[in-house]
Image: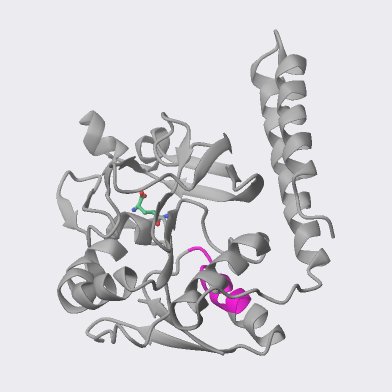
Amino acid sequence: MRLTIGYLYPSIMSQYGDRGNIICLLQRCRWREIDAQVKALEMGDKVDPSEIDLFFMGGGADSHQRLIAQDLVEVKGEAIRKAVEEGAAALLICGGYQLFGHFYRTFRGDDLPGLGILDVHTIHWAAEEGSIIKDITTAGKGRMVGNLIVEWQGKTLIGFENHGGRTYLGPKVSPLGKVLLGRGNNGRDGWEGAVYKNVIGTYLHGPVLPKNPHLADYLIAAALSRRYGQVELTPLDDRLEWEAHVHALQRARQAKGEAIAKTSPTGPKAWAHSLADRFAASLKALRPS
Ligand code: GLN
């Protein structure tokens, strides 16, 4: 079997170590003798919709998004839409997620056009609240930064988030999962990410796949299904990856418990305990290794 990954703007949209996701996908394919290739799709490059099985785009600052938005819509948009409708998979992180939606309103209040493949739109918190960002302190005020844990298909996804945009979902997408810790789409409705067909947009930043092997395999299977129908992936010995997952979960929980203990002298224990219970339940749901 073969699989082609289309890496959208690798030299611009890879701010948080996003390339780690490509390395992870390639390695998990190699271990299974799936012939996986990466095709870089930079500015000006056209997309052949029948070639790409799995699109990937990482995160970037507003200024990076400003550089690529028009190229994404005008040079690549139609072909990506066609591939997605035919079943191509995609993983889009933060800035990439935002530009697969209808539009992203930057902190300055102007709109960058998006592909509209995901029925979502995103507004930077400062534009939404009419605040002017003068310096790093005001920039950080409404920013959503920290560990992010999401309940997805009865298991957990772990990562970190760092975004100013608040994303709102329309009726043609479903949320990826429920926020267990962190802010997710907008810090208000308790949901994280968006899914349409085999496309996943998420605020789980950077190299999210190495420590979430179930998400990596979900994407590989979804991408292969376009050419080969339903595929049963050979199980891998990924105990190390699951250990990393559990370790990251525990560190996030600990950090949250410590923060609560510092800021809430009246009832930190109850808080920390209920959090611990929820994590214990989600850890139980993990795949046995
Ligand atoms: N500019 C966007 C925001 O801050 C994207 C950030 C990112 O990709 N991490 O919301």
117 up-or-down from 173: above or below: below
In-image side of 213 versus 37 (left or right): right
In-image side of 71 versus 38 (left or right): left
Give x and y (percent) for residue 263. 64, 19
Q: Residue furthest top?
A: 266
Residue drawn at (45%, 83%) of the image: 227
Give x and y (percent) for residue 7. 41, 78
Residue 20 is one of the magenta-drawn residues: yes
77 up-or-down from 174: above or below: below
Residue drawn at (81%, 58%) of the image: 243
Residue drawn at (40%, 33%) of the image: 141
Q: Residue furthest front?
A: 229
Answer with the quarter of the image where residue 273 lies.
top right
Residue nearest the observer in this picture, 240 or 54? 54
108 up-or-down from 83: above or below: above
Can residue 181 be seen?
no
Can residue 35 be seen?
yes
Answer with the quarter of the image where residue 201 lies.
bottom left
Answer with the quarter of the image where residue 69 lies.
bottom left
Q: Which residues are magenta?
A: 16-25
In-image side of 277 versus 56 (left or right): right
Residue nearest the observer in this picture, 279 or 129? 279
Give x and y (percent) for residue 175. 43, 44
